[in-house]
């Protein structure tokens, strides 16, 4: 079955959502929202700690502990995880998976070490990609789209999977916050190149977009933040639409 | 986690191979008294044992042995104490695994553990519907497909030698065993503590069996 995953951006223990990663606004307790998404039929949750600093680690650990005690679906923590110790801390607090982004690009060996130590299944590598102007694939970006890396996204996806990433969370920086639909070319290129599940992210706007990420983009899961968080659609409405388009979902 | 309340006392075995927070909280929510046990002495007197686990088969057997749990689990199973294996915990109940050739499992359910042979992606991560053998400990008495759909994360699946030990099956491009059991020893390949209401209901049914055992001694 294809998973539907709401993403909650968290800043200092509170939920926010940025459009194109700027203009963020405050909106609620992450654990309460997580429980609401569980009740709506969310298959998994992702918490993205967007302003993680070392001093704030305790806040996120506390959030992980509360979530693990109150919400009985899998959840992933991403943002600011740089070392094996960072990863160990959130997994020990009760997170099911961690999502590595910048740290994995800067130190690809971290993916390998973490996968060996904690298991492939709990290591998600998040890839933020933007279409290259010259048409030579997609560029990997860091720091919410501000920093170019010179790395091609499909090649990086294949390498990350080879190094032990259990899943890939692929965000189109061109589409994120635009609500014009997922970049299905990017998704399909990565899903077809990497032998691990791909989570589609960035651009969901209409109900039809979610099924397209799967039928055209070959994704194994779909992630969205604002359409759920702003109450545009419920998880149930998204799943009903996907089912109408022939995509198997848990209902 | 400390035991409180009046339900059955469940020992959650902590051998450093998984996070116990969600499983413990789920069991507590269902009325169990939960005691996290890192040594056999701490599990003494428990009405049932829960063996969770993620990671590799060989490493897990090593840790189980280091914590003194292998003998305890075999004794408990021999005397009819309910044992629930979760995910890797189910696989450890078998004789051995393709994941760690040459490493002996607990041998509480005859059979082996094999890598998923499928054209689909492995690990199998996600929700799958289970076809239950009716009337067995985990099988829901009613409900729709969502009540029989659970969250899986695995690359291997058990293969009981005796078909009678298969309690439920699921599909990931190929049919695999999602739950198995023999006597009071049983396990599920999925994570009931991560399977929302369907998972909590399943744990509740298993706990119900534990309670019944207490009330009606053999």
Image: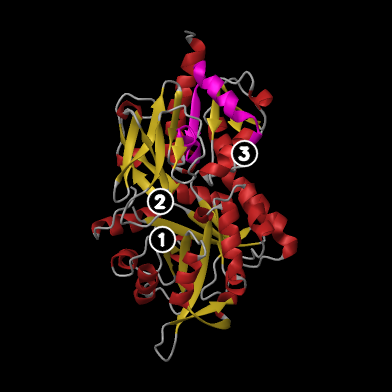
Q: Nearer the viewer, residue A206 or B97?
A: B97
Residue B140 among magenta residues: no
Label 1 marks a residue whose chain is: A
Residue B77 among magenta residues: yes
Please tell me whether mark 1 sits on a helix, a strand or a loop: loop
* The magenta segment: B66-95
Position of residue B42 measured from the top left corner of the image (x, y, whole percent): 67, 25
How packed is label 2: few (under 14 Cα within 10 Å), some, or many (20 or more)?
many
Q: With respect to residue B164, does A44 lie above or below?
A: below
Q: Which residue in the structure is indicated by mark 2? A: B126
| Whole-number angstrom distance, CA of label 1 to CA of label 3 | 30 Å
How packed is label 1: few (under 14 Cα within 10 Å), some, or many (20 or more)?
many
Q: Which residue in the structure is indicated by mark 3? A: B63
Label 2 marks a residue whose chain is: B
Discs 2/3, front = 3
Please tell me whether mark 2 sits on a helix, a strand or a loop: strand
């Amino acid at each position: 079955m294809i998973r539907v995953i709401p993403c909650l951006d968290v800043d200092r223990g509170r939920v926010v959502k940025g459009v194109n990663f700027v203009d963020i606004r405050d909106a609620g307790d992450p654990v309460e929202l997580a429980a609401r998404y569980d009740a709506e039929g969310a298959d998994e949750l992702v918490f993205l700690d967007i302003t993680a600093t070392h001093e704030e680690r305790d806040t996120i650990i506390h959030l992980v502990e509360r979530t693990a005690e109150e919400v009985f679906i899998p959840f992933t923590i991403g943002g600011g995880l740089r070392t094996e110790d960072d990863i160990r801390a959130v997994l020990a607090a009760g997170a099911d998976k961690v999502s590595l982004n910048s740290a994995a690009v800067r130190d690809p060996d971290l993916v390998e070490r973490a996968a060996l130590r904690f298991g492939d299944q709990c290591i998600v590598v998040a890839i933020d990609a933007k279409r290259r102007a010259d048409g030579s694939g997609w560029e990997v970006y860091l720091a919410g789209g501000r920093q170019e890396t010179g790395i091609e996204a499909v090649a990086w996806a294949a390498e990350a999977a080879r190094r032990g990433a259990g899943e890939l969370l692929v965000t189109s920086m061109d589409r994120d916050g635009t609500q014009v639909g997922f970049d299905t070319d990017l998704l399909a290129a990565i899903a077809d190149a990497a032998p691990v599940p791909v989570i589609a992210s960035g651009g969901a706007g209409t109900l039809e977009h979610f099924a397209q990420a799967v039928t055209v983009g070959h994704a194994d899961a779909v992630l969205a933040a604002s359409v759920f968080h702003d109450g545009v659609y419920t998880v149930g409405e998204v799943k009903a639409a996907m089912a109408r388009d022939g995509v198997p979902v848990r209902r | 986690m400390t035991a409180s309340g009046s339900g059955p006392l469940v020992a959650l075995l902590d051998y450093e191979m998984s996070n116990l927070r969600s499983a413990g909280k789920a069991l507590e929510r269902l009325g169990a008294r939960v005691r996290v046990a890192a040594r056999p002495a701490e599990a003494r007197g428990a009405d049932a044992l829960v063996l969770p686990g993620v990671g590799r088969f060989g490493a897990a057997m090593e840790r189980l042995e280091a914590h003194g749990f292998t003998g305890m689990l075999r004794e408990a199973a021999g005397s009819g104490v309910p044992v629930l294996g979760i995910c890797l915990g189910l696989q450890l109940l078998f004789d051995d695994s393709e994941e760690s050739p040459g490493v002996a499992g607990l041998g509480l359910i005859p059979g082996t553990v094999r890598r998923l042979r499928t054209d689909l992606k492995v690990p199998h991560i996600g929700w799958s519907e289970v076809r239950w053998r009716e009337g067995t400990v985990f099988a829901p008495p009613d409900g729709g497909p969502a009540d029989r759909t659970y969250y899986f994360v695995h690359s291997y699946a058990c293969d009981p030698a005796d078909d009678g030990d298969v309690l439920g099956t699921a599909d990931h491009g190929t049919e695999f065993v999602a739950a198995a059991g023999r006597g009071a020893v049983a396990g599920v390949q999925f994570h009931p503590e991560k399977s929302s209401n369907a998972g909590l209901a399943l744990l509740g049914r298993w706990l119900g069996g534990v309670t019944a055992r207490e009330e009606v001694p053999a």
